[in-house]
Amino acid sequence: MRKLLFLLIISLIIIFGLSIYSKRSTNNNQPANNLGEDYQLESKDAYPLTIESLKNGEYPGSDLVVIETLEPGSNYSRYIAYYVSEGNKIYGLLTVPDGQQPEKGWPAIIFNHGYIPPKEYQTVEKYVAYQDGFARSGYVTFKPDYRGHGDSEGEAVGAYGSNAYTIDVLNSLASVKKYQNVNLGKIGMWGHSLGGFLTLRAMVVSKDVKAGVIWGGVIASYDDLINNWRRGSFTPPPTIPQNARRWRQVLIEEYGTPEQNPEFWASLSANSYLADISGPLQLHHGTSDTSVPIEFSRKLSDQIKALGKEVEIYEYSGDDHNIAQSFNTAMQRSIEFFDRYLKD
């Protein structure tokens, strides 16, 4: 009896060991990201960074609440105002033209600034000359600070590993639409660098952006952002959260590389949804831009043209990321472009 019981125990141990070995062998045959095809598709749909996630979201914004009146511009008034985005008060610089308001309200431009360390950012210090150019030309302008920037509530989680800043921009759009001085059908969007990335995402999600202008924009697909974009001299400040600094590593560890999982990475890219772009787009880029490759703008221009959509591109020989040498020319072209599509 004891011998029979001993043999039974040995048999069970052998069967259990073979089962564990079989599972390990099966797992070793999975892709490098350890996700099967069905799980990848399900995760893509649910992942909050996808364009579809943005399209399915709600962006009610709020009233723009003016909290401070600033020294006026040459022909416009300036204010610090805030709106609400996902429960956070987001501050920004609001300008309103002086003079006789058009019957249906002023055209407006949402102004998306580029990367500035969030703790160093101040509402009235950066992009003053840029915003002034549009404000003097008869536009209501609003430059949202994004969450975690300056006095804005929330955490500065970064633009590329989270849709948080894009959500802030879409809520700013909804808030500007509520402002009594604005023509609801004449709202454009301007973006520089990181702000260009946000502008393009907003334009494939919302039909309310009637025209867009992007300077030196991070406007490539995620495949290109992973493989063809490194700022060698840039060291992220330690005040930026780890997940914002390590977005490439975090996403690759979970979903594999663009080569291993192209469908997932395409689902994150506004470039995959250019058929949905809400209006004409104008691109500006310096040929000596060391922060963002000019190829990003060239490729996007080609992609939009291939779809039969309206796009203009201007290159500035020897100019930098801020298009500093040709600033006046780029600004004039930008204003004329918005005038063409946002003014009667």
Image (tube, rainbow, N blue to C red):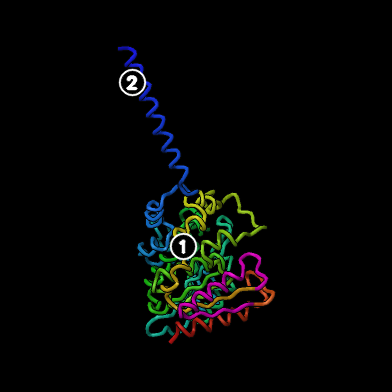
Question: Which type of secondary structure does the marked residue at label 1 adopt?
Answer: helix
Q: Is residue 89 magenta?
A: no
The number of numbered badges drawn on the structure is 2
331 left or right of 147 in image: right
Residue range of the region highlighted in magenta in the rendering: 287-315
Q: Residue at x 54, y 48 (%)?
A: 242
Residue 142: x and y, percent?
48, 70
Q: Residue at x 65, y 69 (%)?
A: 289
Q: Find disc 2 in the rendering and name its residue.
A: 8
Q: Residue furthest bottom?
A: 344
Say if residue 328 shows up in the picture.
yes
Specify the amino acid type for callout 1: Ala
Q: Within the image, what quadrant is residue 288 found in?
A: bottom right
Specify the amino acid type for callout 2: Leu
Residue 266 — which label? 1
Name the foreground residue: 144 vs 74. Answer: 144
Q: Residue furthest right?
A: 318
Residue 305: x and y, percent?
50, 79
